[in-house]
Amino acid sequence: MKVPYKPKSFDLSGLNGISDQTIEMHFKLYEGYVKGTNELTEKISELLEKGTVNQENMPAYSEMKRRLGYEYNGMVLHEYYFGNLKRDGGGDPTAASPFFQRVQGGFGSFETWKGDFISIGRMRGVGWAVCYEDPSSGCVSNHWITSHEVGHIAGYQPLLVMDVWEHAFLLDYKPSEKENYIEAFFSNVDWQRVEKRL
Ligand SMILES: [Fe+2]
């Protein structure tokens, strides 16, 4: 059960409205989640190698398993987030774009979908805005994820992932200016990457 993940690298200097300083700090935080995922996985493996989960070690085991959901999703969500940004990205996808057509089919218009996604991002709290595809129907839906692990729809495919923890923008914007960060986020979206996730 050993899962030695290594931090992935992303070339995200020179983004619009999200400073290199923010990105550097954010990469460091992401690396912490990779480390946390590896360390917890190792500790759980050690416990299993020593024997079964029993009454004595169940509290520690339970805490590690719960914590694993936090660290693991913290790692994976950041990879989706960094992965759907690029220098000179942004602009809205064209009407020929498969993603545009998918959200138009589900929400009636791209603007309605975008308004919903932005509104999730504006919600108070610590978490993420995620647009998912239901692999069985192709339907897209937007969801609020609390922290890193609460609110995911099992089996759904993340298409567009936006970090709205304050660390994602505090060096560039005040907490009250979250909307400016969301605007900056959209001006850097790699829509081709989003479409590849469909
Ligand atoms: Fe983050």
Image (spheres, helix red, strand yellow):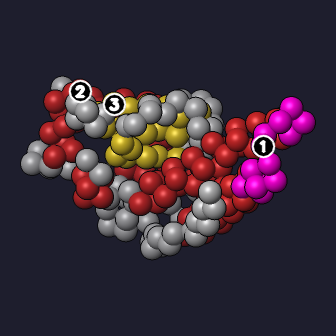
Would residue 66 be found to the left or right of residue 150 on screen? right
> Is the residue 138 above or below the residue 19 in the image?
above
Dot 2 falls on a residue whose secondary structure is helix
N-term mark: 1 or 3:
1
Task: Name the kind of residue labelled 3 in the image.
Answer: Ser
From the viewer's perspective, is the residue at label 1 or at label 3 nearer? 1
Q: Quadrant of the N terminus?
A: bottom right
Name, please, the residue furthest toward the front: 51
- Residue 107 is labelled as 2
Q: CA distance from mark 3 to mark 2?
A: 9 Å
Q: Which residue is mark 3?
A: 141
N-term mark: 3 or 2:
2
Q: In the rendered structure, which segment of residues is drawn in magenta?
A: 45-57
Residue 48 lies in the magenta stretch: yes
Q: Are marks 1 and 2 in contact (CB under 8 Å)?
A: no
At horizontal 61% and vertical 66% (from top left) the residue drawn is: 4
Residue 186 percent across, percent down from the top left: 37, 50
Task: Name the kind of residue labelled 1 in the image.
Answer: Thr
Q: Which residue is mark 1?
A: 52
Q: Is mark 3 within 8 Å of ligand 1?
A: no
Would residue 145 be found to the left or right of residue 117 on screen? right
Q: Is residue 138 visible?
A: yes
Q: Quadrant of residue 38?
A: bottom right
Task: Name the kind of residue labelled 2 in the image.
Answer: Phe
From the viewer's perspective, is the residue at label 1 or at label 2 nearer? 1
Residue 49 percent across, percent down from the top left: 76, 55
> Is the residue 33 above or below the residue 156 in the image?
below
Dot 1 falls on a residue whose secondary structure is loop
Q: Are marks 3 and 2 in contact (CB under 8 Å)?
A: no
Residue 28 percent across, percent down from the top left: 65, 66
N-term mark: 1 or 2:
1
